[in-house]
Amino acid sequence: MTATTRDAAATARTDPATSPADEAAEALRALGVDLPAPGELTVRTPITGERLLTLAADDAASADAAVQRAAVAFRQWRTVPAPVRAAVVRRLAELLVAHKTDLAALVTLEAGKIRAEALGEVQEMIDVCEFAVGLSRQLYGRTMPSERPGHRLMETWHPLGVVGVISAFNFPVAVWSWNTAIALVCGDTVVWKPSETTPLTALACHTLVRRAAVEVGADPEVHQLIRGDAGIGERLVDDERVALLSATGSVRMGRAVAPRVAARFGRCLLELGGNNGAIVTPSADLDLAVRAIVFAAAGTAGQRCTSLRRLIVHAEVADRLVERLAEAYRGLRVGDPRADGVLVGPLIDGKAYAGMRSALERARADGGELVCGGERVEGSGELFTAPDAFYVRPAVVRMPEQTEVVREETFAPILYVLTYRDFEQALDLHNAVPQGLSSAVFTRDQREAERFLAADGSDCGIANVNIGTSGAEIGGAFGGEKQTGGGRESGSDAWKAYMRRATNTINYSTALPLAQGVEFG
C-alpha cells in the first residue's frame, strides 16, 4: 500500500525562473520586509526540501519583552474608540489586496499549497478584515428591564487584554488574521507565535500590520511577533499577562495547553483536530458529491483541519461512488504547487509521510482494501528525486468497519470509505469519533438533511448539506466540539471571546430599593 512508484506524467512541472530561495527573498522584498540576519532557525520549502533562509529565534528574554510591549500598548489601545481602531484593520486589508500575489507566493513556498489555494487563503484574510471593520460599529451590549423602579440594567463589552496567537503551518496566515483582525477592533493587542515551519509568511504579515498602524497614526506596538520552537510558544501559555490564548494545532497540544492556561485563570480558544466525515445517501447527486469529496479530501494534500477523512456511503451507491472517486483521484495532478494544472502539492515533511505510511499499514492490517493511491510519487526530474520532498498520491481505502486508525486523525490525504444501510446507523458511525469539527451530508431528501442538522444529528461545530467539509466562509463562526476544543473564531459572535463583559446597574432615582425585595434596616 505504500510502495514508491514513478509517475513523471503527474508532475506538470514547470521549472521556475528562480530557485525557491530566490523567489522567497524576492517576495519578502516586494512586501517591504527587511531580510533578517541569519540565525539558528532554518526555514525549508516542502516543494524541494531545500533551505529558503535562516532566521534568528527568540529566547525567553526577548519573548517576555514582546509580551511586555503588548501589555503596555494595551493600556492606551483599549481607550481608542472601536471604529477608530478599525482604521488599522481597514488599512491592513488594503495592503493585503496590493500584495496578494506576493504573500500567496510565500504561502506556497512555505506550506506547499497550490497557487489557487494560497491566493484563496490571502483572500480569506481580506474578507475577515472587512468583516472586522464592520464589526467595530456593532460590538453590541444589551439593556434589560430592571425589577427596581428608577433603575436601568445593561451589559457592556470591554477590551480583554493581550491576546496570544499560536498558529499552525497548514493555514499560516488565515488563522492569524481571524484572531488579529477581530482582536484589534475589540481593543486587544496581539502577540503571535507562528509555526516554526512558516515564519516567513508571519514576518511578512507582521510587517504589513505594523505598517498599517503607522500609516493611520496608531501604535505599531499593538502587534508583536515571536519566533522559535514549541518552547517559545509555552511562554505565552504560562504568561499571566496573556489574557486569551488562541492556539491551533493537535489534540495532543491542546491537552498540554488547556490545563496550564486554566491553572492561571486565563482564557483559551482552542482549534484542534478534525476527523471529518460525510454521509452520502441513496438520493445524493453523485456528480456534485464527487466534486465536493475530492476537493475536501485531497485539497492541500489532506493537510487541512477540515479535510474529509471518513466517507460513510449507503450500500446501494457505494460501489458506484468509489469507482468514480478512484477515477477522479487517478486524474489528480501531483507536483510542484507553483505549476499550472497541479492540484496536489507536497506533504509538509518526512514526518507527515511516515504518518501516512503507518496509517495505511494499520488500515490494511484491519482488513482495509486500498482502492487507489497511497504511494510516494517519484519521477526523473529534480523535484521528485529530492530526498526531503514528499509527494504522495491521495489514497482511498475501503474499510470493513470504523477501526481505531479510522477514529484517529492522520494529517495526510487518506479517505476511508465505510458503508451503511440505515440513516441512524450512518449518524452513529459519523459521531463515533472523538473529534467534532466539520461534517457533511449529501442528500436530496429533506428529512435526512434536517435530521443531520438537528440536535441529535451531527455533533460537529460545522454541519453542511450538499457541500464538502472544507471551505468555510468567514461570516460564520469557525470551530468544533469534543476534542476539537470548543473554540470559535472568525464570524458571527466569535468576537465575544476577545472581550470581557460587564453588567451595569444605573440608579437614576432618589431611592435605594434592593433586589429581590430585600429589606435592610
Image (tube, grey):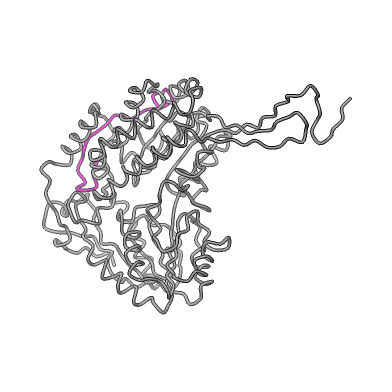
In reply to whether residue 58 is colored magenta, the answer given is yes
Residue 179 versus residue 401 in the image, above or below: above
Range of residues picked out in magenta: 44-65
Quarter of the figure with residue 192 = top left
In reply to whether residue 250 is colored magenta, the answer given is no
Residue 283 versus residue 303 in the image, above or below: below
As drawn, is 312 to the left or to the right of 198? right
> Which residue is pictured at 39% across the width and 28% down the height?
87
As drawn, is 455 to the left or to the right of 251? right
As drawn, is 384 to the left or to the right of 142? left
View extreme (right): residue? 521
Figure disc tally: 0
> Which residue is pictured at 52% across the width and 65% down the height?
450
Quadrant where the C terminus sits is: top right
Q: Position of residue 170 (x, y in %)?
A: 34, 47
Depth check, front residue: 277 or 272: 277
Depth check, front residue: 145 or 516: 145
Residue 388 versus residue 261 in the image, above or below: below
Q: Position of residue 29 (x, y in %)?
A: 20, 30
As drawn, is 260 to the left or to the right of 401? right
Depth check, front residue: 310 or 130: 130
Q: Position of residue 125 (x, y in %)?
A: 35, 40
> Which residue is pictured at 32% across the width and 71% down the height?
370
Quadrant where the N terminus sits is: bottom left
View extreme (bottom): residue? 316
Q: Position of residue 322 (x, y in %)?
A: 33, 73
